[in-house]
Structure formats: structure tokens, C-alpha cells
Amino acid sequence: MSQQTTGLGIDIGGSGIKGAPVDLGSGEFLRDRLKILTPDPAKPAAVAEIVAEIAAHFPETEGAPLGVTFPGVVQGGVVRTSANLDKSWVDTDARALFAEAAGRPVRVLNDADAAALAENRYGAARNVDGTVLLTTLGTGIGTALVVDGRLVPNTEFGHLEIDGHDAESRASSGAKEREGLSYHDWAKHRLQRYYRTIEDLVWPDLIVVGGGVSRKADKFLHHLHIRTPIVPAELRNTAGIVGAALSAAEV
Ligand code: BGC
């Protein structure tokens, strides 16, 4: 394990780009996070400027590892998919772009993967053996698979085709909002179908539900009838930032 004790994490989302210095011992923020609205259009150059601005806002982290999440597949620092952000990201070398903008090395990884690393180290998946599936319910559905503490990166089970639809277009919390579904109807008719399908394909030992809506887990998780234990994430909206910082420190 790395000797670093502080890292800087930045989480790129469809509505906001958020960053904070992280105490890697406890997984807690060392200062209040800074949130800047995601530019519209969210093209690479405009987003990179904000990444640089957030890094500069925390000068005490200069020299500390910097990790940045992206809401799509990221292989070797290169973005491969961008379902809910500008399409010009596809095939962009985000690692090189952000490193140039921030003036220091950067690790770039998928947002759900980052959240899973954080939950695995500090939260709901801590000390869990076997296969943990983390799902983030937001604009889309992010997924991450952790097997005996090791991340299998870039799983994209939010895009499973279920009943002829891209799963996230029906079961994300974005779909709930768009269609004005109650927690009960969303859980019974959308999440139930989603989690039943995925548990039959992956057979995880534990499912962790993250994303902003996991704060309201008591309104919908009890409506689900699946065989796999399913629990809310513990880090809630800090998981992406914390996991980004952690992954950068452990390269
Ligand atoms: C993307 C995933 C991402 C998820 C949550 C999906 O549409 O394909 O890579 O993790 O949204 O942002």
C-alpha cells in the first residue's frame, strides 16, 4: 500500500464537478468540497479547465496524488464511452488532458469504480469477501464489481438490455424523475426487474446501492424481493471523490 496520507479527488458528473482533499487513512474530507457546475456543452477542454481550477483551489494538495472520475468507460486513461456527457469525449486521452491542465500526474477512472473502491475501503463493502456489486443510481446506472477486495474495472451493467430497453433508461433515478414515478412504483416495477436480472447473471454475495438517491434507501429498498443481500452505500455523495483520491494514491 502507498505511504501517501492525503489525496485530491475530483468527481465529474453531468450536473456538477466536485473535488476535495481526502484523508486516505479515514476516507474523510480534509476541507469542504468545491463544486462547480458542469459546463454546457461539457466538452473536454472546458471540463479540463474546471479540473485545473479545482486542483488550484486546494494548493495544500500540490504534490499529492490526484484522481479524477469520469461517467463512462476509461481504459488506460482514455475515455471509451460517454453515455450521459458530451460525445466528443470518446477516445479522448483524459489522463493526458487533465495532467496538462492541472500540471501534475493524474489517474482517471470510471465514477462507479471509484465509488466501489471507497465503499470497499471505508464503507458498506468493507471486509466483505466474495463478489460485491455496487450500483450507482443517478442520471444513469453505474456498476462496479469488486471480487475479494479487487476491482474488476469498467463493468457496464447499467446498459444491460432488459425487456428491449437500455436498463438505465428505465431503472435509473433519472428515469424515476423523468416519469414522475413514486418510490414504490419505481422500486416495484423498475428496480425489482433490474436487480433480479443482474443477480441472475452475476450472482454477487452483496449488492451496494449508491448514488444520491441512496440517501432515501429506506423509501425503496424494502420493496425489493431478491435473493442477494442489498444495502445502501455508506459514503453517499463523497464516494466518487474519495475513491478517485484513493485510486491515485495506490497506482
Ligand atoms: C455510464 C457508466 C457510468 C454511469 C454512471 C452510465 O451511463 O455508461 O460508465 O458509470 O452511467 O455515471
Image (spheres, rainbow, N blue to C red):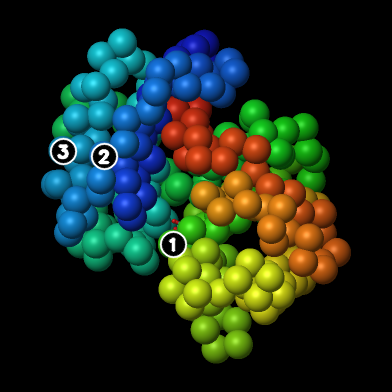
Which residue reaches farthest right?
227
Reading the image, the residue beneath label 1 is 139
Question: Which residue has dot 2 on it?
Answer: 36
Task: Determine the residue positioned at 57% across, 41% down.
Answer: 236
Question: Image point 69% across, 61% down: which residue?
Answer: 220
- Reading the image, the residue beneath label 3 is 49
Amino acid type, label 3: Glu
Q: Is residue 9 left or right of residue 59?
A: right
| Left or right, residue 234 beside residue 91 | right
Determine whether the beta carbon of the residue marked 1 sits less than 8 angstroms from the nearest atom of ligand 1. Answer: yes
- Ligand 1 is found in the corner quadrant, namely bottom left
Please provide percent x and percent y for residue 8. Answer: 38, 24
Is tag 2's residue or tag 3's residue first in the polypeptide sequence?
A: 2
Please give left or right for residue 137 compared with residue 62 in the image: right
Mark 1: few/some/many CA within 10 Å (<14, 14-19, 20+): many
The reply to whether residue 117 is in sight is: no
